[in-house]
Amino acid sequence: MNLKGATATIDAIGTQRAIAQKIWAKKADYVLALKNNQEKLHEEIELFFDDSQVLAKCQSVSVWRGIGVFGGAEYWQSTRIGFLPQKKDWAGLRSAAMVCSTVTKPDGEIVVQRRYFISSLPLDVEGIARVIWGHWRVEAMHWCLDVLFGEDACRVLDKTAAFNLNILRKLVLSVLRLLEVNCRGIHSLTKKRFVVGCDPVTYLARILTL
């Protein structure tokens, strides 16, 4: 793959030294999620960002978006990671980042989640925030396509057919997100799809005007 000048993002399963080395060798940058598959590194980065004095010296930015009913995320990034004994093992490693996501559910419950990343990107918290958010958007769409349409279980082998089906699923997904159904309180895409499927004639004219 020609990755020169790009920034690769990978879930924790791809956070491996060999993968980081290949990306860096292609003259590209990376943002890699940290979980327990890199247990020691994850623990050290977590402890690093748990220190309030460290956070005060980090670049940070808050981004509030419509996640659930109301929510958003705060991003922190630091290049002060010389203390990591593993730093020399990760090609091009320059910074670490933390995302603290907050979501308020319809029942009023507030859920806070922290995620950690290592990156070859220099200090630019707004830039790394855009990269992480972009990765999340791709993952969110993939999750919807798999759960709503069973895309991962699709056995179509012809590449052109599979590509066309992917386009159709994304088109339907966009329609479901825009469409208002007659049943009050229905917001989930699965329920919307069921309602429309039960009465396609009624909804066809409305869909064509979206």
Image (tube, rainbow, N blue to C red):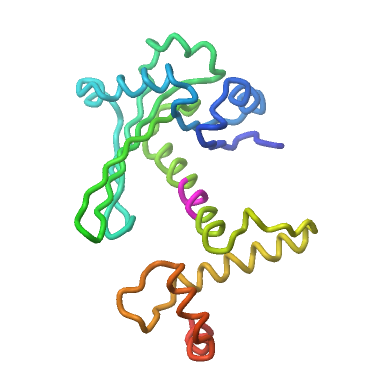
Front-lying residue, 28 or 15? 15
Residue 89 appears left or right of 78: right
Q: Quadrant of the N terminus?
A: top right
Residue nearest the viewer, comparing 96 with 18: 18
Frontmost residue, 201 versus 171? 201
Q: In percent of the image, x 50 and y 58: which residue is there?
A: 144
Q: Quadrant of residue 188?
A: bottom left
Q: Residue at x 50, y 20 (%)?
A: 93
Instruction: Identify the residue at the far right of this view.
Output: 158
Is 141 placed left or right of 97 in the picture?
A: right
> Which image quadrant is residue 97 in?
top left
Q: Position of residue 132 (x, y in %)?
A: 44, 41
- With respect to residue 209, does 167 lie above or below? above
Left or right: 57 with respect to 134? left
Residue 56: x and y, percent? 22, 25
From the viewer's perspective, tell me whether residue 83 is left or right of residue 58.
right
Q: Is residue 178 above or below residue 44?
A: below
Q: Is residue 35 above or below residue 207?
A: above
162 in the magenta segment: no
Q: How many marks?
A: 0
Please tell me whether the stretch drawn in magenta is mainly helix, strand or loop: helix
Is residue 153 or residue 23 the one in the foreground?
153
Compared to residue 107, the image places residue 36 above or below, namely above
Residue 115: x, y in percent? 37, 35
Residue 125 appears at what percent x and percent y?
37, 35
Numbered range of the magenta stretch = 136-140
Residue that appears at 33% across and 55% down: 67
